[in-house]
Structures are given as structure tokens and as C-alpha cells.
Image (tube, rainbow, N blue to C red):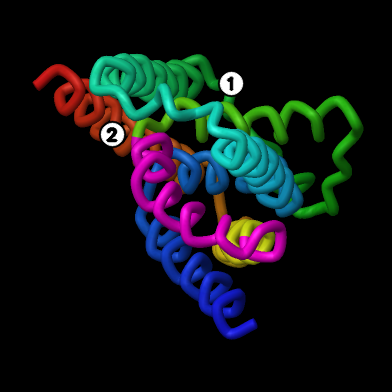
Amino acid sequence: MNEIIEIFIGSMVVAFSGALTPGPMLTLVISSVSKKGFWTSFFIVLGHSLLELLVVICFFTGILKFLDNPLIAKIIGILGGAFLLYMGIDIIISIFKKKTVIDFKSALKEKTINRKSTINVVFQGILISLMNPYWFIWWISIGAAFLLKSVKFSFAGISSFYIGHISADFIWYLFIGSLVNTGRRFFNQKIYNGILISCSIFLFYLGIKFIVEAVI
């Protein structure tokens, strides 16, 4: 039992260290919550956690061994970097075309999410993870090491690892979502555009970095 608890705590701490580092998912949560409300943060993380559940299952069955390949890693880096650059450009274009204009009075009202928009947000959580090369690198290194230790304790060990890992993601990103949602009442269009521009600049940085590291 002590080993199971250690796996849970260790998994949570390591996941927190990754979540606290600014990345594409943090950018997605901030921009989405600013526009659509708090619950988008939950559904983004839900999509992320569903993808990671699939990864855990695939590692357990040995399906993802092919990812530990330098060529695959380079391809992931280039494609992921290109996608991040696209996201950054799309944000800038949306600002200039005034597609991000928000009625801040109505934004203060409680948001309702219908089934279609919920599915879209969950899918965004999945996609933003798939397009992040560091996510793959983490899973074929740190994640794999944790899973090798966890699998010794069968289902209990794997479950402890997974629950600890996603708990950190939910706690952190729901906290960020709450902060952004609460602060939204103090927003205006200029502040909102400033946040979007900052996010796009950060995406440019990450995109270029991913591509350069993949090519070199």
C-alpha cells in the first residue's frame, strides 16, 4: 500500500512541475476561459486526460514503443512547431479582423455550453496535447519510467499513477480558469487583445523552438 501511495504522490508532484511550466495548453485555457467562461477549462483538461488514459493503456499493451525513435521525434517536433505557429498567426489575424470582439457585459453572465460546443472544447484539449512535442517526449521518458514502476503493482499501480497525474492537471488548470473567469469582469477589449497578443507571441516562440530543436 505504501508503494501505491508513493506512486500517486510522485505522479502528482511531477505532473504539477510540468503543468506549472507555461505551454500551449495554458495558453488555450486562458484564451478560451476569457471568451467562453470557466467550464471550458474543465472540458479542455477532460480532453487532455482522456488522451492520456489512452496513452496509459497503449503503454501497458506495448503499442507505443515505436515512438522511441529519433526520426519520429523530429517529425513530431516539426509538425507540432508548425501547428503552434499557425495558432499564433490565427490569433493575430482574428484581432485585426475584429473576430475577437466581445460584449463584456454579456460575458459576465453565466455561460451555458451545449453538447456540440462541449465536444469541440474536449477535442481542443486532445489536439493541443497531440501538437505539443514535449508532451510526447515526457511520455516516452518520465511517463514511461513511472509506468514501468506502476505496472509492477498491476491495476492498482497504474490507476494510482494515472489518477495522481490527471489530478494535478485538473487542480492547476481549473485554478487558472477560475482566476481568469473571476478577473474577466475587470477586462475590457484592449486588455483582452493584449492577452491574445501575448499568447500568440508565446506560441511563436514555442513553435520556432520546437522546429529548431527538431531540425538540429
User: Magenta region, mostly helix, strand or loop?
Assistant: helix
Quadrant housing the N terminus: bottom right
Q: Give, as a single range, the part of the protein colored magenta.
A: 134-157
Q: Residue 25 in the image: x percent, y percent?
A: 49, 42
Name the residue that disc number 1 marks.
99
Numbered disc 1: secondary structure: loop
Q: Looking at this view, is 40 or 105 the one in front?
A: 40
Name the residue that disc number 2 marks.
206
Q: Residue at x 24, y 33 (%)?
A: 205
Residues under numbered marks 1 and 2 in contact, where contact means CB atoms less than 8 Å apart: no
Q: Residue 75 in the image: x percent, y percent?
A: 31, 14
Q: Residues within 10 Å of mark 2 (few under 14, many from 20)?
A: many
Q: Earlier in the sequence, mark 1 or mark 2?
A: 1
Residue 62, which numbered label?
Answer: none
Mark 2 residue type: Leu
Mark 1 residue type: Lys
Across the whole image, how many numbered discs are drawn on residues? Answer: 2
Q: Is residue 205 visible?
A: yes
Q: Looking at this view, is 102 or 2 the one in front?
A: 2
Quadrant housing the C terminus: top left
Numbered disc 2: secondary structure: helix
Q: Is residue 170 visible?
A: no
Q: Residue at x 39, y 40 (%)?
A: 140
